[in-house]
Image (cartoon, grey):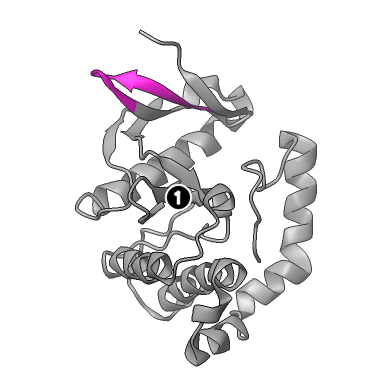
Amino acid sequence: MPEPTVLKADELGRIEIAVHEGVPVIRRDIRAARWWARPLARRAAAREARALMRLADVAGVPRLLGWDGAELLRSYIPGAPMQQARPSDRDYYRQALLLLSQLHRRGVVHNDSAKEPNWLMDEDGSPALVDFQIAWTRGRRGAFYRVLAREDLRHLLKHKRTYCPQALSARQRAILDTPALHSRLWRATGKRLYKLIARRLFGYWDNEGKGRVRD
């Protein structure tokens, strides 16, 4: 059996491509986290498991294969991350918008769609979305939920503006020009503190995948 391929290892644990029952999977190992970070790592993995259970019938997101409180297994989606694939076909973004719509109808907001590495182009050119560890899965789909869902959409449109700007509609450009209040406050205040803490404690912030991160 081949050795696992480590994708990321830090204070919150280790993420790797492994083989499970003869097929490649993504394994998130909480046991590899520093002792003081394990509660946070376990909570993030549990959140991802909860989101993937809700999305079990949605194409373009990983399947949850197992979660026992120490190790999370999800299906491996072959493809290239956005910063490598650089999708310029308007059909990719049409399908990506439909994918987000399916998430939101099932009560899941991704909350991290600003990261290029979280968007994949699979082997047939279709979009896929991974890394649901900060997804919103609780509560009613009220006003705050709709604000978060709109931010999912706005971040995708920022990627579209980078790689396929000619396909942006007037309505989409208007959405890009009106970030939510919490997003504006985050850029002005919280993000600076987050970057400082993440760099000092974890040695990175949210760009370890080497793609762009759009506010």
Residue that appears at 37% across and 72% down: 94
Quadrant of the drawing holding the C terminus: bottom right
Judged left or right of residue 201, residue 133 is: left
Span shown in magenta: 14-24
Secondary structure found at label 1: strand
Q: Looking at the image, which residue is at 61% across and 42% down?
A: 209
Residue 196, above or below 183: above
Q: Amino acid at mark 1?
A: Leu
Quarter occupied by residue 62: top left
Which corner quadrant of the image does residue 179 belong to? bottom right
In the foreground, 109 or 2: 2
Residue 215 visible, this orientation = yes
Point 34% across, 74% down: residue: 141
Q: Residue furthest top?
A: 1
User: Circle 1 sits on which residue?
Assistant: 120
Residue 202 sits inside the magenta stretch: no
Q: Measured along the vertical axis of the image, is residue 22 above or below residue 149? A: above
Q: Is residue 22 magenta?
A: yes
How many numbered discs sit on the rendered protein? 1
Q: For the stretch drawn in magenta, what is the main secondary structure?
A: strand
Q: Position of residue 189 (x, y in %)?
A: 77, 67
**Left or right, 202 with reference to 70:** right
